[in-house]
Image (tube, rainbow, N blue to C red):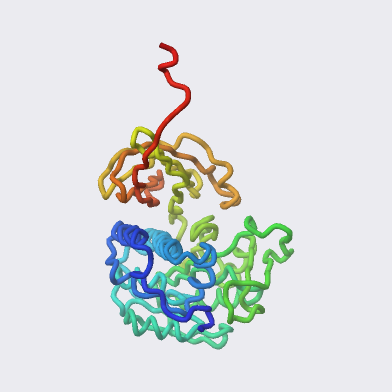
Amino acid sequence: MTDAGQSRDLAFDTIDPRYLAFIRDYLGRYGLDADRFCRPLPADDEMFFKAILPNYEHDVSIAGFKFVESTLRHFDAYRQIVDGALGGFANLGTVLDFASGWGRLTRVLEQTLKPSQIFVGDIYHDAVAWQEATFGVTGVFSAPDPGGFEHAGGHDLVFVGSMFSHLPDGLFQRWLAKLHGFLGPKGVLAFSVHDQAILPAGHAMDPSGLTYLRFSESGSLDLEIYGMSYVTEAYVGAAIEAVSPGASWRRFPKGLYENQDLYVVGAPGVDLSGLKLASTPMGGFETATLLPTGETDYAGWAIERTPGREISRVSVHVDGRLALSVVPDRERPDVLAAFPNAANSPVGWRFRLQAPAGAMVRLHLESSSGLTGYAYAEAPAPAAMTYSGWSRRALR
């Protein structure tokens, strides 16, 4: 068995064909080649096998879909930074995906940029070597302490997803200084953190502005350098100011994944005051009830996490064709437990639809931000049903 507790790679073509169809359709919405993206997940990928998979009761089909979903939401944030701060992908030089793991984001970037433009770095050297061999990108081997890590830098974008959310005080500042130093003249650094708003119950914020808890999904990294950290905006702002006095920076609450805040910091002289970034809408099916009419009644929830924005419409597509649209018509405060301190209240939606058994039902959660989230279901087979009870005939 590997350290990740998995004896072999996970091949996408071994998961439930229905979920694989959802995945391939989802990737197509982003113009991606599904075969290129769906290379096997390496058995040592702790992010998948020790975080995503256990969160979905070790159901590899659901976890595989969630892996793709989180990757594409990650890319939504990445693309907005590239467009808003760097003038689009056509204007990019080189980029560094740091703490890249086994290349979740690389699966998209290598279809968007030339391999020669992409640098990946991680403390897991075997993960970096795998990405070099699989995607043809340039790898840089990281170290437990930034003092032991050297790299030429000069990148237009250094993106660090879910590393600063695990660092203790002191190491947080040293890595910030090291990675900010890898920016070129027009470069920006983006990194995600756990805000104090999602600090687990029973814990108090440390007066320093960073509370550090000694646990994580990693089974191999020292808990003295990699646990779970929760920070205040003042703490992050002070760290940025110490590294680059007067630097332009922005905070985007819930800007990455479900609950991590995203900070974007410019190189000296780079102005980020006009940068805008929205979170991808999220939502899902909850019930599908077969009716005597032959229709199915579908219901579920959605949430827009971007301040000042709303989910304006839910469009329903059956096997790729628009079938109907509905407007969310109720609030769902019960969903807030999964999204603490969200900027907007979750909403509920409901619609009835008659579709062939096995048809793919895809929801477009359309936001006033311009972003769209997606949710999938398979139309159920009709059931033989009888009905008894109150009827209008009793009134005649």
254 up-or-down from 288: above or below: below
Task: Report x, y in % for residue 127.
Answer: 44, 82
Q: Which residue reaches farthest left?
A: 321
Task: Report x, y in % for residue 243.
Answer: 57, 73
Q: Which residue reaches farthest top?
A: 396
Q: On the rendered structure, is 36 left or right of 265?
A: left
In what quadrant of the picture does the C terminus appear? top left
Residue at image coords 58%, 47%: 336
| Foreground residue among 12 and 241 | 12
Residue at image coords 52%, 56%: 254
Count numbered badges in the picture. 0
Residue at image coords 27%, 67%: 33
Q: Quadrant of residue 277?
A: bottom left
Q: Is residue 312 visible?
A: no
| Foreground residue among 300 and 100 | 300
Q: Is residue 316 visible?
A: yes
Q: Quadrant of residue 96?
A: bottom left
282 up-or-down from 147: above or below: above
| Foreground residue among 234 and 73 | 73
105 up-or-down from 223: above or below: above
Q: On the rendered structure, is 370 left or right of 160?
A: left
Q: On the rendered structure, is 224 left or right of 19?
A: right
Task: Report x, y in % for residue 54.
Answer: 54, 67
